[in-house]
Amino acid sequence: MAVWVSAGGCGLLSPIRGRLRAGRAAVLAWRVPLRAAGTGPVYDVVVSGGGMVGSAMAAALGHDVHFREKKILLLEAGPRKVSGRLPENYSNRVSSISPGSATLLSSFGAWDHVCSLRFKPFRRMQVWDACSEAMIIFDKNNLEDMGYVVENDVIMSALTKQLDAVSDRVEVLYRSRAVGYTWPLTCHLSDTSPWVKIDLADGRRLETKLLIGADGQNSMVRKAAGIQNIHYQYDQSAVVATLHLSEATDNNVAWQRFLPSGPIALLPLSDTASSLVWSTSHEHASQLLSMDEESFVDTINTAFWSNLHHSDFIDTAGSVFRSAISLLMPSGTAARQLPPSIARVEPKSRAVFPLGMGHATEYVRHRMALIGDAAHRVHPLAGQGVNMGFGDIACLAHHLSTAAFNGKDLGSLKHLLQFETERQRHNLSLMAAIDLLKRLYSTNVAPFVLLRTWGLQTTNALSPVKEQIMSFARPNFSSTCKNYQASATKGLWFAGA
Ligand SMILES: Cc1cc2nc3c(=O)[nH]c(=O)nc-3n(C[C@H](O)[C@H](O)[C@H](O)COP(=O)(O)OP(=O)(O)OC[C@H]3O[C@@H](n4cnc5c(N)ncnc54)[C@H](O)[C@@H]3O)c2cc1C
């Protein structure tokens, strides 16, 4: 059996060369996690948290050819999400998935399952202001998909199937909560373990060469590592629900209207159903939850259709500016479409989620990396939360795969820091843009409304700018980190971001 040997002080001898010489018997033996004297099994990688991001991370590594001799463990506090028959009713938890994320999921076979289960592509995005006539439209002549609306349960089901497909490499422990982590010294001493120790709630203890924290916004991995999390709660909660349209349509447009109390979005699910994500004040959110179904539907239709927040001054200033733009760029103004009218809400589909922003000041430490909401949490107005998490996976998997191929120590800060730099650069700018949008649109003070009206009208009229933004959206089937990042931002609701 191959053995990990501490190479005097801090270094580690790569086990790969030994394994290659030892042949198949050694490879089979290698798949059984090693057990250091008096401790639990030692894994190459443990992913703590089996939500969409952690499960996708484990599945991506499990399908990576350079990880075929590695032992991976996925720990999930909750039960296995059974991937049986899909319920007839749509779930109220859905995500807008960018083509970049679909590419990542395709790279290890999960997107095929999504396609065979249930999803809805959208080919146009219309975003408009409730305080003026300003709007922006994204489309590719209705020819290319701008993104996909997928139920979170469908994504989980697809990921579970792909985890089952590599069960010889990826062990999954459901109902297994990690309750403590012990970090190794960066410089290994002979009487201490060089690995991260993980204590489970049931008393078991495991060890790993690399711990990936994918345990959500309240990440215990992040807290145990003492990593600072810059965070705050927004003055908004998101109300979600499954809605039925008054009549069947192609329903391939994602709609979002910025109301002074927060954005209301309608994501297509089928020709006759859409998913609501309405970010609004906490008080209004609880009212929306408690009102009868008919009033709820009326309130949604009013939110999309009413001009209650318009003022003559802004309307006049906006229309003068729009006329000037249409004179200068006659092809630069697109016709506004009307959103579909809602007929009824799926009973018991309403739910509310408090919203916040959070960012870990560090994504990595020696033998540890944070991904997904454990590293960053954003407002859902741009539909980017899980897409950013999938971007983390593409990047981290790329660096780990290279490290594994080169026989390097997976937990080494060298490549983990490359992951951190690339992802923080990407995530921070996106988070800043989303936060700015949230603030810019949370007011109906005239100068701000005018500023954003003109900004939106100008962006909408400048086809090259919109092209540039949409170029991020083109499906890209290369799995490298940088290429993934280029396409991962596609699917932003609002072009200005
Ligand atoms: C209303 C709303 C709408 C949204 N819409 C979109 C959208 O359209 N597009 C988009 O990209 N994003 C969207 N998001 C964001 C997206 O839902 C999140 O970014 C995503 O779910 C985060 O996934 P995650 O796996 O990182 O974390 P989580 O989903 O929080 O998963 C963490 C997992 O870790 C497990 N866990 C926690 N602690 C432990 C422990 N100690 N031991 C073992 N397991 C543990 C938990 O059980 C959980 O399963 C939306 C969010 C909201 C609230």
Image: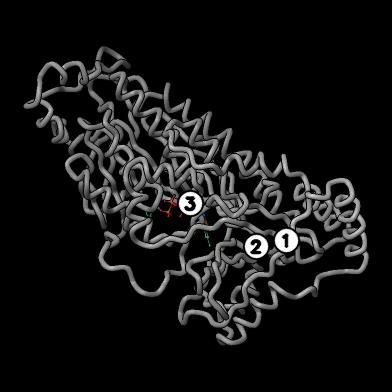
Label 3 CB, ligand 1: below 8 Å?
yes
Residue at horizontal 72%, vertical 55%?
136
Of pointers 3 and 1, the one earlier in the residue sequence: 1
Q: Say which quarter of the image contains residue 107.
A: top left
Q: Nearer the viewer, residue 468 or 214?
A: 468
Q: Residues within 10 Å of mark 1 (few under 14, many from 20)?
A: many
Residue at horizontal 57%, vertical 36%?
426
Give me the disc on residue 217: 3
Quarter, ligand 1: bottom left
Residue 133 relative to residue 150: left or right: right
Of pointers 3 and 2, the one earlier in the residue sequence: 3
The amino acid beneath tag 2 is Gln
Circle 3 SS class: loop
Residue at horizontal 69%, vertical 72%?
304
Q: How crowded is mark 3: few (under 14 residues within 10 Å), some or many (20 or more)?
A: many
Q: From the viewer's perspective, is the residue at label 3 or at label 1 nearer?
A: 1
Of pointers 1 and 2, the one earlier in the residue sequence: 1
Q: Mark 1 points at which residue?
A: 128
Q: Which of 315 and 26 is in front in this view?
A: 315
Give me the disc on residue 271: none
Mark 1–mark 2 contact, CB under 8 Å?
A: yes
Mark 3–mark 1 contact, CB under 8 Å?
A: no
